[in-house]
Image (tube, rainbow, N blue to C red):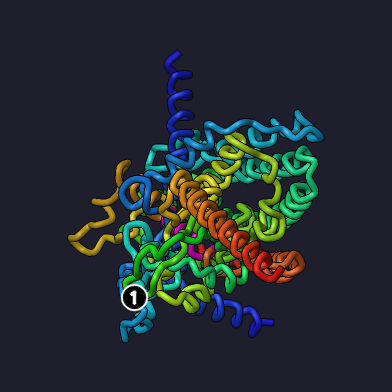
Amino acid sequence: MNFYLTYVLVASALFAFTALFTLFALYSERKISAFIQDRLGPMEVGKYGSLQAFADILKMLQKEFIIPTAADKILFILAPIIIFVSVYLGFAALPWAPGLIPASLNLGIFYIFAVLSIETLGILMAGWGSNNKYALLGSMRSVAQMVSYEIPTGLSILSVVMISQSLNLQEITIRQGILSSEAVNFLGIYDVKAIGGILSWNVFQAPHLIIAYIIYFIASLAECNRAPFDIPEAESELIGGFHVEYSGLRFAFIFLAEYSMMFLVGMIGVVLFLGGWNSPLPNMGSVSLANWTTGIGWGIFWILLKTLSVVAMQIWIRWTLPRFRVDQLMSLCWKVLTPLAFLCMLISGIWRLTMM
Amino acid sequence: MIRKVLNVFITVAKGLKLTLGHFFAATESRKVKAISDPNYFAQNSGITTIQYPHVQLPIPEVGRYQLDVEMDDCIVCDLCAKICPVDCIDIESIKSIEAIGKTSDGTTKRLYAAKFDIDMAKCMYCGLCTVVCPTECLVMTDTYDRSMIDLNEMTYKFSDMTAAEADEKRFALEKLNAERFAAKELALQQNTGNKI
């Protein structure tokens, strides 16, 4: 019986985390965008507008559920649930600290990748179910974009998996730090197993993974429909894209999914390439910083710090770069990212055979 | 191809550097200065927002905002209503039976303003009415923040007479006119009587 209680507790904790993170990200995104544009952002609700996100969500909760008359009601109602659940399920296999993982799956990254693809289905359902030309256009663009960008994402993930020889995210993380049971080679030459820290991260174990990470990062921006790849939403052309017709709590769920997706893709990138919960501080002689800063508390701290930096980077990019055109988006994916990802995969194979 | 990709990275980096510069400049806020200040345009970085209801930019005293009438000085000459391009001033005057008094610049007032309405919703803030006003009683003030819940409240009523007072003056004028008319008739009759 306790078994199930733990399951429910873990699931609720993860849900609470995604909700809190969304509120936090909403506020920080508004503030960061304001500062970038020489504005102040929310200032009235609470000190420096800190309660603005709560006020927004309260407003959302009070709103009426509007279903357009001509909408396909079943698809329309199911879509936000599917969109959110697919992202939320992804959190199940992500490691937070040594020994702290909701579900230590052997197929971890494969599972996340498969579950995230379902989001596309939800978006298509939302667009089709709304019976609105903008929503349909947005969702069609979204599907085209997400399906295309899953290829460079998958290939860059594959090049990491080839290096670490595991699909289990906890395993992949352990092999990037002092807790590793195998040799950890900085640039494939120097053994840094005892030193740990930033030197043992995957991007420094095999430097071509830096390119793989850049590919993954760009593709992940496209996967979570964020600027400069936000053509499915395209506020200025499609007035919001697939979620035009949604109101109240249903819209809130789509929003929640969007921001959780940002955190999720950021965290996957951190786990695969940037050492996950491993400390960036190396052991230096008698000052064994890596040993001191490894543990459950430290693990959560490091992974949150790294992931939030990646999320901040995503926000920063959104408020800097203009939106891609559809053809530019596709040509970037198929002509640049996909061949480069293939190249990374090839190098990974050679690296595995010769250097390790 | 490689050059193109490299160029992409260079330009993206340039853009990111620019936005990051603005992000870190956000510690500084715009100083509240009047437009007459020589350094008004000097500050080129930092947040430009002024938190309006809490902080206000100083404006010149002779701003061209809301209209205001000093009714004690008004001679009800109707010039402002005539020059107004959008006809937002509505004046109804009643002739007085005697001189009412003097304005502050010594002009004798001979008309009562039964109605002096300015519809600020129509006003285009050209300021022509203030130019033609002979006694300079119609001025533009530095008040600009006025919003109303009811559209009718946008019509400012400056007349200081009550309806009863206006009726009284009207009645007095009619009486005087009737008396004058009667006197004229009488004179006319006498004239015609003399001629015949």
Query: Residue A224: image x %, image y %?
Result: 61, 52
Residue A11 belongs to magenta span: no
Between A117 and A284, which is closer to the camera in this rendering?
A117
Residue occupying image coordinates x 32% and y 86%: B38
> What is the three-letter code of the residue carrying label 1?
Gly
Q: What residue would you read off at disc 1?
A: B106
Left or right side of B144 for A153: right
Asked whether residue A189 is in view, the answer is no
Q: Which residues are magenta?
A: A308-318
Residue B96 seen by the camera: yes
Q: Nearer the viewer, residue A309 or A322?
A: A322
For the residue labelled by badge 1, is the local secondary structure a helix, a strand or a loop? loop
- Magenta span: chief secondary structure: helix
Question: Is A7 located above or below residue A141 in the figure?
Answer: above
Classify 10 Å Cα crowding around label 1: few (below 14), some (14-19), many (20 and above): few
Left or right: B39 in relation to A286: right
The answer to whether residue A127 is left or right of residue B99 is right
Rendered residue at 38%/82% (across/down): B41
Residue at left offset 33%, top offset 45%: A46
Query: Quarter of the image holding residue B45?
Result: bottom left
Position of residue B152 measured from the top left corner of the image (x, y, whole percent): 54, 48
Above-or-below relation of A183 to A170: below
Asked if the stretch drawn in magenta spans residue A313, the answer is yes
